[in-house]
Image: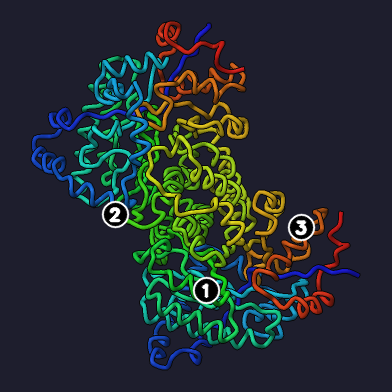
C-alpha cells in the first residue's frame, strides 16, 4: 500500500502561559509575573468580546487531551499520526491565544505597542523551549524561531545563528514594522545574508493587521461595542498584510542580492497569488500606465513572478479553490498546512478536508503540495520522514477519483 | 446612429496657482503664498513619499515632444476653451473631472487625490478642499451639462463634509465626491461616524469615489517606486471593503461607489476572496448582520471608472459585469488615451460587441452621473467616434 508523505507547513505550539517563566532570562521574571495576569485576563476578555467563547468551548469539548499536544510531545505525536502528518513546521501560539509567548512575541508579532527588551526576552524564552521540543522528534519537526527583527538587526542576526546552532532552521519576523524601517531598507542586509548563508527560511505568518481601525480600539475596550463589520474587514485585510512584505522584498531587489534566500508566507490563503503576480509583472514591464514613473526596475534581472517561483513558498490550507488555481500559483510554490491546533484548521477533520481538495487531482501535484515541496524547501531528512509516512501517511489510493 | 456617445469617466483639471489664489479665503492667502513658494518643502515631501521624482525624465521628455503637447494641448487642465477643443477632437462629449490637472496646476495645500499625505492642521486641509471646489464650480459652469465635477471633502469633521456635499449639489457640481483614502488618524470607514455622509450622498445622488493617489510613505530607498505602484491600487479600493462589511450598502441601497483609475482586473479575484471569507463556517454570526455576499454589493453599488487604460478589462468584462465598467481618457495625463483616443479605443475594444461598447463608453456613466443623454446625443452625432471603427 502506497502512502503520501505529508508535511504540515503550518502548525502551532507553545507552553501554557505560566510555563514560559522558567525559560525566561531571570531579570525579566518580575515583569513576567505582572504581565501574565494581564495576558490571561485579556484572553478571557477577547473570547467574551468576540462572542467566540461558546464556539471555542464547543470545539474543544472532548478534545481536551489531544489539544495538550500544543505543548505535550506524546499527545502531539498522537494527533499528527492520526492526521497522517509525518512532518510539520511549528509556529508559536498553540491553542489560539492561550499559548502565546509573553510580551507580544507570538503570532501577532509587531513592534507596535511592544518594548524592545521585553519582546526580545519573550521571543528567546519561546525559542529556548521550542529548541527542546523540536529535539524530541527532530526528523519530524521544523521549528520556527520568533525574531522581532525590526528593533536591531545585529541582534536579529545573532538570534538566527543561535537558532541554527540549536536545530531551528526557520524564523518568523514581523509582518508589520510599525515605525521601524520597512523591509526594502538596506539596514536589513546582514539579516538576509545570514539567512541565506545558514539556509534559514524567513516566514511571515498571518495575524497582524490594522486591527485598531477595524475594531475601534485594539485590544478592544472592555465596555465598548465592536464596530460593525470589524471581523469581516479583519479577515479580508489580514491576508493582504501578511503578503505585503513580499512587495518590499521583490522591488527592493533583496532576491537579486540574495538569490538563495528563502521566504514563506503562511496562513494568508493562496488565492491572492495569481492576480498579485500578474499585476507585479505588468508593473515591471514597459507599460502605458507606468510611463510617467522613473526607473524602478533596472536593478532587477528577473520578473517579479520569477523571483516568486524561485524564492517564495506559500503555506496554506489549500482549499478546493486554491487547488484549482495551483497552476497559476505555481504547483511547486504551494505547501499544504493543517494549522493544528487552531479551530480554523483542518484537525480533527483533516481526512475530509484533504479529500475535498485533492481527490482526483494528478498524483504528482498532490504529492508535491502535500509534502514534497516542503520536504525540499525545509531540508527535511527524506529517508527518515519516508519511514514515518509509510506507517501513518494517507493512502494514495484513497485520494484517487 | 453612426457615432458613439463618448463620456470620459476619468479626466483631471486644476487651476494655475495664480488662478487658485483668488478662490482662497482671504484669511488663508498668506499661508497659500508661502505654500506655493515652498519648493524645498515640496521636494522634501516627495523624497519622504517615494524617494526619487515620480516622473521619469525620459518618459516625460518623449511625452512633451508630442505635437499636441508642444502646441499647448495640456493647457486644457485649467483653460476651459482649450479643454473643450481638446475633448472635441478626441470625440468626448462629457467628462467626469477629478483634481490633479498637470505638473503646472495647483492642488491647494495638497488637497486632492493625495489629501492627508502629510501632516498639517485640519482647517488647512479643509480650506484646500473648499477653495478647489469653488474653482471647480466655476470651471464646470463654463459649459453646463458637459462637466461632472467631483468635489473634495476632508473628513475631520463629518458634519462639515455633509454640508459640503449639499453645497456641491446646490452649485450643480454633480459628479459626487472623492473620499480621502487615508482618514488622518480618525477611525476608518466602517465607523458609524460616517453614516450621515453616506446618507447625504445617497439622498442627493452624489457618487462616492476613491481614486488612486494616497499611499504610505516609502522613503528614498531602492524599489520604493515599484512598491508605490503596486500598493497604490490596493489602498484606493480599501474603503470599499469597509463599506461592504459594515453594511453601508445594506442601509444605503442607492449609494453609488466608484473606484477610478485603479485598474479592473483585481475585481474578480478580490471579490472571490471576500466571498470565500464571508462563507467561512466560523463567521456565521457575521452573516446574520450582513445578508448578502460582498460580490452582490459590488453588483448593486460598485462601479469601475477608467477601466480601459489597457486591454485587460475587456477580456474580463463578463466576470466583472459589463454594466460596472466605465471608460475614461485620463486627459490630460500622459498615461491616458489623449490625444489618440479613437485609435486607442479601436485597439482596446476591437473585439467587444457594439451594444456593450455603447454601455462602456457612455450610457453607464450617463446614468451614474445623471448626464442628459438627449442633449449630449446631438453633440455626439457631430464629434463622437464612428461606430464603424470601434467594436465588433
Q: Position of residue B224 (x, y in %)?
A: 39, 53
- The chain ID associated with circle 2 is B
Is B318 on the left-hand or right-hand side of B79? right
Q: Position of residue A307 (x, y in %)?
A: 56, 57
Where residue B48 is drawn, which disc sits there? 2
Q: Position of residue B96 (x, y in %)?
A: 37, 25
| Element on which disc 2 rests | helix
Q: Nearer the viewer, mark 1 or mark 2?
A: 1
Q: Is residue B285 above or below residue B352?
A: below
Quadrant of residue A77 within the rendered picture: bottom right
User: Would you call the spot at circle 3 few (<14 residues within 10 Å), some (14-19), or many (20 or more)?
Assistant: some
Question: Are callouts 2 and 3 both on one chain?
Answer: no
Residue A241 appears anywhere in the view: no
Give the spatial CA distance, label 2 vs label 3. Answer: 45 Å
Identified at 58% across, 34% down, the residue is B320
Question: Are callouts 3 and 1 both on one chain?
Answer: yes
- The chain ID associated with circle 3 is A
Q: Nearer the viewer, mark 3 or mark 1?
A: 1
Where residue A195 is drawn, which disc sits there? 1
> B48 or B127: nearer the eye?
B48
Identified at 66% across, 80% down, the residue is A69
State which tag comes first along the sequence, 3 or 1: 1
Q: Which residue is mark 3?
A: A365
> B256 or B8: nearer the eye?
B8
Residue positioned most to the right: A1
Amino acid at each position: 500500500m502506497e502512502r503520501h508523505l505529508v508535511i504540515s507547513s503550518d502548525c502551532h505550539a507553545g507552553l501554557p502561559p505560566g510555563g514560559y517563566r522558567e525559560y525566561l532570562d531571570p531579570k525579566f521574571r518580575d515583569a513576567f509575573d505582572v504581565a501574565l495576569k494581564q495576558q490571561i485576563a485579556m484572553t478571557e476578555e477577547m473570547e467574551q468580546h468576540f462572542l467566540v467563547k461558546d464556539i471555542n468551548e464547543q470545539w474543544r469539548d472532548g478534545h481536551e487531551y489531544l489539544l495538550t499536544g500544543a505543548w505535550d510531545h506524546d499527545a502531539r505525536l498522537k494527533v499528527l499520526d492520526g492526521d497522517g502528518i509525518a512532518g510539520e513546521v511549528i509556529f508559536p501560539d498553540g491553542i489560539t491565544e492561550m499559548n502565546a509567548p509573553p510580551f507580544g512575541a507570538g503570532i501577532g508579532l509587531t513592534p507596535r505597542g511592544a518594548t524592545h527588551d521585553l519582546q526580545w526576552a519573550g521571543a528567546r524564552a519561546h525559542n529556548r523551549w521550542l529548541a527542546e521540543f523540536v529535539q524530541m522528534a527532530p526528523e519530524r519537526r521544523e521549528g520556527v524561531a520568533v525574531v522581532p527583527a525590526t528593533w536591531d538587526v545585529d541582534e536579529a542576526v545573532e538570534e538566527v545563528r543561535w537558532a541554527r546552532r540549536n536545530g531551528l532552521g526557520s524564523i518568523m519576523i514581523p509582518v508589520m514594522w510599525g515605525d521601524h524601517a520597512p523591509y526594502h531598507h538596506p539596514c536589513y542586509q546582514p539579516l538576509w545574508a545570514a539567512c541565506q548563508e545558514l539556509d534559514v527560511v524567513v516566514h511571515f505568518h498571518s495575524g497582524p493587521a490594522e486591527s485598531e481601525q477595524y475594531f475601534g480600539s485594539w485590544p478592544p475596550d472592555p465596555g465598548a461595542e465592536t464596530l460593525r463589520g470589524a471581523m469581516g474587514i479583519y479577515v479580508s485585510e489580514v491576508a493582504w498584510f501578511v503578503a505585503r512584505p513580499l512587495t518590499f522584498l521583490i522591488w527592493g531587489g533583496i532576491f537579486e542580492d540574495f538569490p538563495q534566500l528563502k521566504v514563506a508566507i503562511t496562513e494568508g490563503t493562496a488565492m491572492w497569488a495569481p492576480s498579485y503576480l500578474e499585476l507585479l509583472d505588468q508593473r515591471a514591464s514597459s507599460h502605458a500606465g507606468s510611463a510617467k514613473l522613473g526607473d524602478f526596475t533596472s536593478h532587477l534581472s528577473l520578473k517579479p513572478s520569477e523571483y516568486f517561483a524561485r524564492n517564495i513558498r506559500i503555506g496554506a490550507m489549500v482549499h478546493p479553490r486554491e487547488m484549482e488555481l495551483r497552476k497559476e500559483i505555481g504547483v511547486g510554490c504551494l505547501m499544504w498546512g493543517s494549522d493544528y491546533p487552531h479551530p480554523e484548521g483542518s484537525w480533527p477533520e483533516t481526512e475530509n478536508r484533504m479529500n475535498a481538495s485533492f481527490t482526483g487531482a494528478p498524483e504528482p501535484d498532490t504529492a508535491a503540495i502535500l509534502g514534497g515541496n516542503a520536504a525540499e524547501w525545509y531540508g527535511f531528512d527524506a529517508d527518515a520522514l519516508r519511514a514515518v509516512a509509510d506507517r501513518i501517511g494517507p493512502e494514495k489510493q484513497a485520494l484517487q477519483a | 446612429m453612426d457615432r458613439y456617445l463618448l463620456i470620459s469617466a476619468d479626466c483631471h483639471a486644476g487651476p494655475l496657482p495664480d488662478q487658485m489664489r483668488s478662490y482662497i479665503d482671504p484669511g488663508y492667502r498668506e499661508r497659500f503664498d508661502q505654500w506655493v513658494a515652498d519648493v524645498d518643502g515640496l521636494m522634501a515631501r516627495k523624497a519622504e513619499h517615494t524617494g526619487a521624482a515620480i516622473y521619469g525624465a525620459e518618459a516625460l521628455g518623449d511625452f512633451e515632444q508630442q505635437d499636441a503637447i508642444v502646441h499647448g494641448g495640456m493647457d486644457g487642465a485649467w483653460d476651459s476653451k482649450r479643454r473643450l477643443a481638446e475633448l472635441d477632437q478626441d470625440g468626448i462629449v462629457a467628462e467626469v473631472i477629478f483634481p490633479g490637472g498637470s505638473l503646472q496646476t495647483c492642488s491647494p495645500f495638497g488637497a486632492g487625490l493625495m489629501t492627508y499625505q502629510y501632516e498639517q492642521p485640519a482647517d488647512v486641509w479643509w480650506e484646500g478642499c473648499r477653495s478647489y471646489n469653488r474653482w471647480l464650480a466655476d470651471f464646470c459652469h463654463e459649459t453646463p451639462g458637459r462637466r461632472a465635477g467631483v468635489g473634495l471633502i476632508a473628513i475631520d469633521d463629518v458634519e462639515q463634509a455633509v454640508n459640503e456635499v449639499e453645497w456641491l449639489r446646490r452649485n450643480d457640481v454633480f459628479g459626487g465626491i472623492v473620499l480621502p483614502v487615508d482618514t488622518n488618524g480618525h477611525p476608518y470607514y466602517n465607523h458609524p461616524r460616517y453614516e450621515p455622509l453616506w446618507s447625504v450622498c445617497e439622498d442627493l445622488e452624489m457618487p462616492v469615489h476613491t481614486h488612486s493617489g494616497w499611499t504610505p510613505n516609502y522613503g528614498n530607498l531602492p524599489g520604493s517606486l515599484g512598491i508605490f505602484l503596486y500598493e497604490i491600487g490596493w489602498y484606493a479600493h480599501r474603503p470599499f471593503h469597509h463599506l461592504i462589511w459594515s453594511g453601508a450598502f445594506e442601509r444605503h441601497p442607492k449609494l453609488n461607489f466608484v473606484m477610478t483609475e485603479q485598474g479592473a482586473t483585481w475585481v474578480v479575484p478580490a471579490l472571490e476572496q471576500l466571498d470565500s471569507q464571508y462563507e467561512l463556517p466560523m463567521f456565521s454570526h457575521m452573516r446574520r448582520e450582513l445578508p448578502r455576499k460582498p460580490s452582490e454589493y459590488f453588483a448593486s453599488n460598485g462601479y469601475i471608472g477608467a477601466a480601459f487604460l489597457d486591454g485587460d478589462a475587456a477580456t474580463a468584462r463578463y466576470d466583472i459585469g459589463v454594466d460596472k465598467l466605465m471608460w475614461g481618457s485620463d486627459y490630460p495625463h500622459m498615461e491616458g488615451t489623449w490625444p489618440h483616443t479613437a485609435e486607442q479605443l479601436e485597439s482596446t475594444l476591437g473585439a467587444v460587441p457594439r451594444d456593450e461598447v455603447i454601455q462602456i463608453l457612455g450610457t453607464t456613466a450617463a446614468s451614474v452621473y445623471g448626464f442628459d443623454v438627449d442633449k449630449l446625443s446631438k453633440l455626439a452625432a457631430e464629434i463622437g467616434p464612428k461606430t464603424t471603427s470601434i467594436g465588433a
